[in-house]
Image (cartoon, helix red, strand yellow):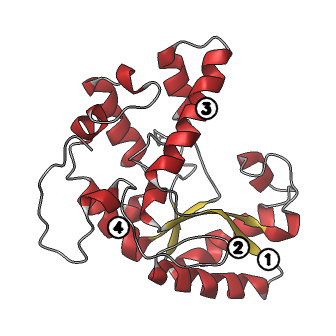
Amino acid sequence: MSLIPGFAFSKTPFFSFEELIGKGDPELFGDGYQLRKEAHLAFLEMQQAAKKDGIAIKIVSSYRNYAHQKKIWERKYRNYVSRGLSPIECIKKIIEYSTIPGTSRHHWGTDVDIVDGNFINTSYLLSAFNFKKGQPFYKLKIWLEANAENFNYHIVYTNKEDRNGFKYEPWHYSYKPLSFDYLKQFKDLDILEILKGENFEGSEHFTETFIQSYFEEHILDINPDLLP
């Protein structure tokens, strides 16, 4: 980073600047996935509870560092450019579901994308269609809505009609006891200045207005239960 803002917090736990933007080295746990210890243990309890009801909760995405998120972003950017979209159109298309590198909740080791492992070969795995009634992950969706919060996992991007930002993601859940504090500290960062110090495809088209809108709609317009 070319710029590391100084900031201080009175509340523990304290997360380093690098951890907040996915460039840290957090201690992670899991078999085939990576989570902070507390989130990992809570997930195992939730997974076992779901198993009793015939649901095999499987994590298909958990911790992603900055470099990983950058690869996702640039792959999508190049794909949309090849289809003839303008840079601004590419960015708008990407942020329907994917975050700008350095701003992903997956950088924290608190968030998971989950499906029912009994139907792992389902096409277009992370599609809201697969969670509709009559589709492979509908039973999982209903179970999570009824039980996930008992394990401190909360859906992040709800299907509330007036919500802005990322589209509805019935597969994305967050471990609130940790992600709440991560977001609280992340909000104190100057995201525009941080992104100015980065260099990835499309980033030169970010404006102050765009970043402000992105922050308010994509970072903060989430399930109110997860907001500090």
Q: Where residue 173 sits in the image (x, y, percent)?
A: 55, 64
SS category of the residue bearing label 1: loop
Give the mark nearer the N terminus: 1 vs 4. Answer: 1
In percent of the image, x 54 and y 86: which residue is there? 41
**Which quadrant would the N terminus be assigned to in this image?**
top left
Q: Where residue 193 sits in the image (x, y, percent)?
A: 22, 36
Mark 1 burial class by Cα count in 10 Å: few <14, some 14-19, many 20+: many
Residue tagged 2: 143
Give the mark nearer the N terminus: 3 vs 4. Answer: 3
Q: Where residue 33 sits in the image (x, y, percent)?
A: 62, 70
Type of amino acid at the residue the image marks with label 1: Ile
Tags 1 and 2 touching, CB below 8 Å: yes
**Is 91 on the left or on the right of 44, as rendered?**
left
Tags 1 and 4 touching, CB below 8 Å: no
Residue tagged 4: 180
Tags 3 and 4 touching, CB below 8 Å: no
* Residue 49 visible somewhere in the drawing: yes
Give the mark nearer the N terminus: 2 vs 4. Answer: 2
Q: Is residue 104 above or below residue 2?
A: below
Disc number lying in front (1 or 2): 1
